[in-house]
Image: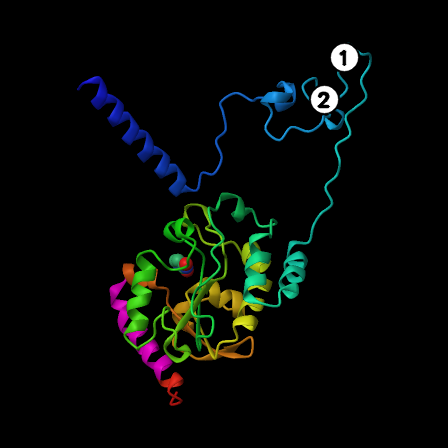
């Protein structure tokens, strides 16, 4: 192998290793040895504070220094924030979908945001009669900034196309509006935690109130739990219920259908039930 091949191979191997780590949810790089950013010269510090605001750390609390006996450093106590209350306030202030999108993009209390590339807000026609509520963005959605664009999303599009509904349709009667419980990808596509769902629920409620669909379809356990507090999508699926004052149909998640094609038969029955409701026969 020549030196050029070697460099190319290293480059591809490095890129593959990096992509793998991003897939696992790695969002920060930490060195092997600790670096005190306070000891670096001013010009080398990213986002350095003015010297007067810096509390010396290297010597540790109570250690003597050249300037005489030190007093223990005082660390400011960060007041505890009620994230659910903050989400409720931010969501309630939004009087349009655009304002809600901005409010969510500016909401910093959910740690998932730190590892996400995009705040995935919605896709489709906001005037659609049917709103689909999914779980959370995966890798493809995080990269593209739109919900359900990966393999599960492509299956979702085919499923709803089979009953004449498409997210891109300008006619509200034939359109879909799609959003998720969480707008940020959980690292490594892990299941959302109940605390994350509780924190983002006020935004989901407001989202549904502002979009004001005729019917809601929840795809999978997380949105079922977020809207009803109920668990067990396999038992709940196919049975119409009411959530946030609207008729709601629970369905299994298309990612589950990709893994378990036999379940498509039941999903088809659910789609026909949705179609009958839309036609006023359900
Ligand atoms: N699964 C979801 O629940 N939502 C998405 O946006 C993508 C996959």
Seen in the image, is 85 located left or right of residue 191? right
Q: Which residues are magenta?
A: 260-275
Q: Is mark 2 within 8 Å of ligand 1?
A: no
Query: Which disc number belongs to residue 105?
Result: none
Return the residue at label 1.
65
Residue 22 seen anywhere in this rendered image of the structure = yes
Of label 1 and label 2, which has the lower sequence position?
Answer: 2
Give how far across and how far down residue 41 sits, in percent: 63, 18
**Whether label 1 touches label 2, CB < 8 Å:** yes
- In this picture, is 260 found above or below 60? below
Give me the residue at 50% from left, 29% from top.
Answer: 30
Give me the residue at 35% from left, 38% from top.
Answer: 20
Seen in the image, is 101 located left or right of residue 21? right
Prevailing secondary structure class for the magenta stretch in the rendered image: helix
Rendered image quadrant of residue 128: bottom left
Residue 36 seen anywhere in this rendered image of the structure = no
Give me the residue at 47% from left, 38% from top.
Answer: 27
Return the residue at label 2.
56
Q: How many marks?
A: 2
Q: Nearer the viewer, residue 226 or 43?
A: 43
Give me the residue at 75% from left, 36% from top.
Answer: 76
Asked which secondary structure carries label 2, the reply is loop
């Amino acid at each position: 192998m020549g030196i050029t091949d070697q460099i190319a191979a290293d480059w591809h191997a490095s890129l593959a290793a990096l992509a793998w780590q991003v897939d696992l949810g790695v969002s920060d790089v930490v060195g092997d040895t600790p670096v005190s950013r306070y000891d670096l010269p001013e010009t080398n510090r990213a986002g350095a504070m003015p010297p007067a605001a810096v509390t010396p750390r290297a010597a540790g609390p109570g250690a003597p220094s050249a300037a005489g006996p030190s007093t223990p450093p005082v660390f400011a106590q960060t007041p505890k924030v009620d994230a659910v209350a903050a989400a409720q306030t931010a969501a309630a202030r939004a009087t349009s979908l655009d304002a809600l999108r901005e409010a969510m993009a500016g909401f910093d209390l959910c740690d998932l945001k730190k590892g996400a590339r995009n705040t995935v807000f919605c896709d489709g026609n906001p005037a659609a009669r049917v709103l689909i509520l999914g779980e959370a963005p995966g890798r493809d959605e995080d990269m593209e900034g739109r919900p359900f664009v990966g393999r599960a999303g492509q299956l979702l599009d085919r499923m709803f196309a089979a009953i004449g509904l498409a997210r891109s349709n300008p006619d509200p009667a034939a359109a879909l509006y799609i959003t998720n419980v969480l707008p940020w990808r959980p690292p490594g596509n892990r299941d959302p935690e109940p605390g994350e769902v509780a924190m983002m629920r006020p935004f989901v409620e407001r989202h549904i109130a502002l979009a004001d669909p005729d019917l809601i379809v929840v795809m999978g356990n997380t949105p079922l739990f977020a809207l009803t507090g109920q668990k067990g999508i396999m038992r709940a699926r196919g049975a119409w219920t009411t959530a946030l004052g609207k008729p709601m149909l629970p369905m299994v998640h298309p990612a589950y259908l990709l893994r378990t094609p036999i379940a498509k038969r039941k999903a088809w029955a659910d789609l026909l039930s949705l179609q009958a409701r839309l036609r006023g026969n359900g």
